[in-house]
Structures are given as C-alpha cells and as structure tokens.
Image (cartoon, rainbow, N blue to C red):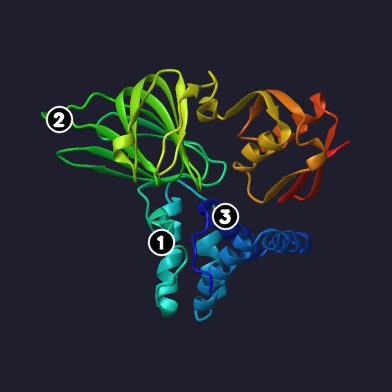
Amino acid sequence: MDDSPIDPVIVQRAIEWMARLWSGEASDADKAACQQWRMEHPSHERAWSRLQIMENKLHSVPREIARHALYEPKSHTQPARRRVLKLLGLTIVAGGAMHLEREHNIWQIAFSDYSTQTGEIRKIMLSDGTRLVLGTATAIDVRFDDLKRRVFLRSGEILVITAPDSAIACRPFQVQSRHGTVEALGTSFTVRQTGNFSDAAVFDGAVEIRPNRAMSAAMRIDNGQRTVFSAEHVEPPIAVHKNAAAWTTGKLVVENMRVADFVAELERYRVGILRCDPAIADLQVTGVFSLHDTDRALHNLTFALPIRIIYRTPYWVTVQQK
C-alpha cells in the first residue's frame, strides 16, 4: 500500500464526497461525479481508500447513526470538531482507531482548537486580544505559555491582527505552518498553507520568516510585501495586492487574473468539483466576486467573458467556452 503523504485538501475533498454519498440524498449523477473525481488522480483514489478503512470499521455501528455524525449541519452548539469527535468515537467503538493521514496531521486537524468548513469564514479573538480570521477549510491550534504565543496552522489560511502582550515578559507571537515560523513584529498579516509551500503577506508592521530546515535563512517581510516559503527556502518578497485580504470580508477581488486561477481559487470555497475548460484557461478576469455565494460569482463571470457554466449536479460544475 502506498503510504506517502496526501495533500490535506484532497483528504478534505474525499471526506466531503463521502459525506454526500452517506447523506441519503445523493443522486446517480452525484455518484458518477464522485467516481470521476476518484479517477482524476491516483492521490484521489488513495484518499478515498483510506476513508474506506474508516467506513469498513463502522459496519458494526448502525449506519444511520454513523451517517448522521458525519453529515449533520454545523451549528454553534455542535461545532465541526465535536461532530468529528463523535464520528471518531463511533469508529473506536466499532473496532479501534484507523490510519487516515499520519504525515499531514489529519488527526490533529480533527482535534483542532478552531476550524472552519469549506466556504466558511470565521472571526475569533484570542485570550491576549489578538484577532484572527479563519478562511475556508482552515484548522488551527493555539498554544500560549510563559515564553511564547503560538498558533499552529494545520490547514488553510488565517489573517492575524496581533495585540500587545500584557504579560510581564513580552512574549513573541508566532504562526507555525508546515514549512516554517512566521513571527510578528507588531503586525497584521496572513499566512496560507498548501501542500508544497506557505504564503505570507504583511499589511501592517513586519514579520520574520524562518524555514523549518533552514532557520539561519530567516527573512524579514515588511508592510506591503508578500512571499512564498518552503521548509528550506524563502523567496524574495514582492508587492502584495492591496485587496489580497478581501477574502476576510467574503469577497474575491481580482485584477487581470487567469480564469483558470480564478476557478481554482473559487473552488476552495465550494463542496464538490469545479472545473475549468483549458480552452478558456488564459482569459483574463477583473472584478469583485462573492465568496459566500459562489454560484452567483460564477454567474457574474458570464457577463464579462464568452463562457457558460454547466451544472451536471450542484457538486459537479464546469466553466466552458460559450
């Protein structure tokens, strides 16, 4: 069995497909769309197979109970973390813990202190007064002690607006991603994590970035700059777009963005598959689009460009040439 790491975004998508199929509302088209997604890339099928291990272990649990634990809607009284814990608890009762994705901390994501579902944007305030905005499909852990204030970014994207530390010994504020540490220097900044790298953008003050495997290669990023870094290297900073943090207000503001890149960004806020026809991939789009209503964003795209939106199901959508 291939035990290599799988991008957490792919694992999340597999979970969403399984939730849909377990919902009791899945149509034949939904099942076909899920099968198509599984066939698109070997890592998709590997993620699905690992989830099947969980499903097999749930066979001794009444299916309606297990399905409800996975699929019930999010609410303030039943957050995502608790729903996942419920499902994992059922799994343990059914026969013990299973392996989903060790290297990418899927278990840690499931037990994260704060998280969002796909398409959700959430604001929180930490005990020191620091404000955070969690983007779509984001999970974080918060660890404050006598020496440091640390936020561990398990997946997704966050905006941080740091507050002065009220502790007697001023503690640095750090965001730890899979690839390195971003330390605030009186700052408003974002950090976004993907499979191969992290992205940091500064909107006030500055940050210092230290890659996990090259701590001596620390780089300072100042107000109005952004960079991409891996565990070994930090790229030279470039200017950050003035609307780069518009996602925190539920808007996607783009200027001369490739349609393929626009569709990929919008897909992060949708459950299911959103495809872009290669024939229109390089068309340019400019405008302000809603992240709370991605169907409306897609519809608005048709006003400016010679494209059409094809819905095979609500969860399988293609942007095509008109």
Q: Residue placed at 56% from the left, 59% from the top?
A: 15
- Residue behind mark 2: 167
Q: Residues within 10 Å of mark 3 (few under 14, many from 20)?
A: some
Q: 88 or 104: nearer the eye?
A: 104
Q: Could you tell me how far apart the alpha carbons at marks 2 and 3 are, in whole angstroms?
A: 40 Å
Image quarter where the C terminus lies is: top right
- Residue behind mark 3: 10
Q: Position of residue 285 (x, y in %)?
A: 72, 26
Task: Say if mark 3 contacts mark 1, CB within 8 Å.
Answer: no
Q: 22 or 305: nearer the eye?
A: 305
Q: Residues within 10 Å of mark 1 (few under 14, many from 20)?
A: some
Q: Could you tell me how far apart the alpha carbons at marks 1 and 2 are, in whole angstroms?
A: 34 Å
Residue kind at label 1, given as amino acid type = Leu
- Residue behind mark 1: 85
Q: 89 or 305: nearer the eye?
A: 305
Could you tell me which secondary element the residue under label 3 belongs to?
Answer: helix
Q: Residues within 10 Å of mark 2 (few under 14, many from 20)?
A: few
Could you tell me which secondary element the residue under label 1 belongs to?
Answer: helix
Q: Position of residue 261 (x, y in %)?
A: 66, 35
Residue kind at label 2, given as amino acid type = Ala
* Residue 254, above or below 262: above
* Residue 105, above or below 306: below
Mark in the foreground, 2 or 3: 3
The part of the image, by quadrant, that contains residue 169 is top left
